[in-house]
Amino acid sequence: MKKRSFSLVQSWGSLALVHSNLERVFVGDENVVVEIVAATICEADRRFVSGSKRVEGNSPCTTLGHEAVGTIVAVGSNVKRLKVGQLVAIMPHQVPAEERKKQAFAKGEIFKLHTHHCGMQCDGIIANHIEWPADWVRPIPKAAIRKAMNASVEHGLHWSLPLAEIEHLACVMTSVAQFEVADRAWAGNANVNRLKSGKGRVLLIGAGWMGFLYCMHLYAKYPNANVAIKDPDEQRLRMFRDLSASVLGKRPDIAYGLDPNAEETFDVVIMATAARAAAMDLFRYLKPGGHVVLFSGIHNGAIELVFDPAKLSDLERVHRDGIHTMVYRTPEAEQRDMVVASGTSGYTVRAFEAATRNIGDYAAGIGAGITGVVMGMESKELIAVRRGATPLVSADGQPILKTLFEPTWHGRQNHLKIGIHPNPTSEIRSSYEEFIGKGAR
């Protein structure tokens, strides 16, 4: 059987593999070539573009993005467990050889390792095709695909888009699992037990997409927990709460920054934003003995260090190195007033595989939150697919992706999540017929 050949073609923000008879690029023995069916944009991508997210060992990457699903179109000669035609999720953290010697790698704890993050340290997934190590993709079960198909119909989405969020769901699952490990080690399960009993309060700082995924996962794990949300933007708070009400049947409380009654009332505070201001004041919402979950990295946190109130613990390190420890809640550094701190940056292999199996259970919520779709790499328009969202057209005539990756793009107050179909087939296009050229529903 003749091998398929591809050529490297440069377009804006994308190093794409396309069918061609020109320069031949054959798939490596240990790799697969994946045709990207659906991808999504992450706030971390915008932070990387702006320079506020620093990754170690930066390379001149031209392709952004790290959340995608696609179909295998070619396999290397040494790849046995994967086949052409399989739909797979991309694991975007490649582990270099020196990191594979560590115990964390043997345990599958990728979030504790210094990895090559696609879209940052190596070319990412917002491309027509990518060549990727076979070890770092996972087939999506048919049951999960069926659930995604059923859940996507009512939202006017192609069923592949919710599946593209497998990586994000894996990150949230890992973070919550690390919270449980740390709370058992440092607090005797005190905060976990309070959430399970319904007596515990959780504050999510950041009314963005990751905060919403946290909300879904927390309610799934701790149905009786009391969840509140904090964000300086009123419009995003309303969007977040309305989405939560429609998907989960629950509308989280709002913790207002100037309300003294909110201080020292939460058992758990989750930082689901990279805003430095959030890292500076989150401790005042925690009860003594509470638990702070440092999920998001901090803007310029690796360069301009951010410490706990006692100025002893580097919070970015807790996040980036997957540490759990005790830190001081106040500048007085009183031992009886300490809190647990845990952090993650990425996922475990176990969580990624769990997210791949269970993504169908989250597909309805994810689909409800996707507000716009880009149809093709060179598209100049964002199609609005949710009520209240607005279509966006590139003002300078360039691909709309360029605008969407700008850190201050003007549509972010009306959009929680944007999806991309780099290769919009007729089947994919038919899913959006009612929206193309018609604006928001």
Image (cartoon, grey):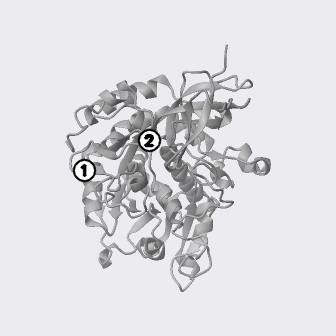
Q: Which residue is mark 2?
A: 377
Q: Residue at x 26, y 33 (%)?
A: 154
Residue at the spot x=61%, y=73% of the render? 303
Q: Earlier in the sequence, mark 1 or mark 2?
A: 2
Name above or below for residue 81 compared with residue 372: above
Give coordinates of residue 33: x percent, y percent.
61, 31
Q: Nearer the viewer, mark 1 or mark 2?
A: 2
Image: 308 above or below 78: below
What secondary structure is marked by label 1? Answer: loop
The residue most toward the top is 1
Does the rendering let one see residue 10?
yes
> Residue 389's mark?
1
The spot of residue 214 in percent (x, y) is 42, 52
Task: Please state the horizontal and vertical placement of residue 30, each as a whole percent of the image.
Answer: 72, 31
**Residue at point 56%, 59% (across, down):** 183
* Quadrant in which the N terminus is drawn: top right
Tag 2: amino acid: Met
Q: Nearer the viewer, residue 108 or 372?
A: 372
User: Could you tell me how far apart the alpha carbons at marks 1 and 2 are, in whole angstroms?
Assistant: 21 Å
Do labels 1 and 2 touch, CB within 8 Å? no
The number of numbered badges drawn on the structure is 2
Observer-nearest residue: 213 or 340? 213
Q: Badge 2: few (under 14), some or many (20 or more) residues near its Cα, within 10 Å?
A: many
Disc 2 is placed on an element classified as loop
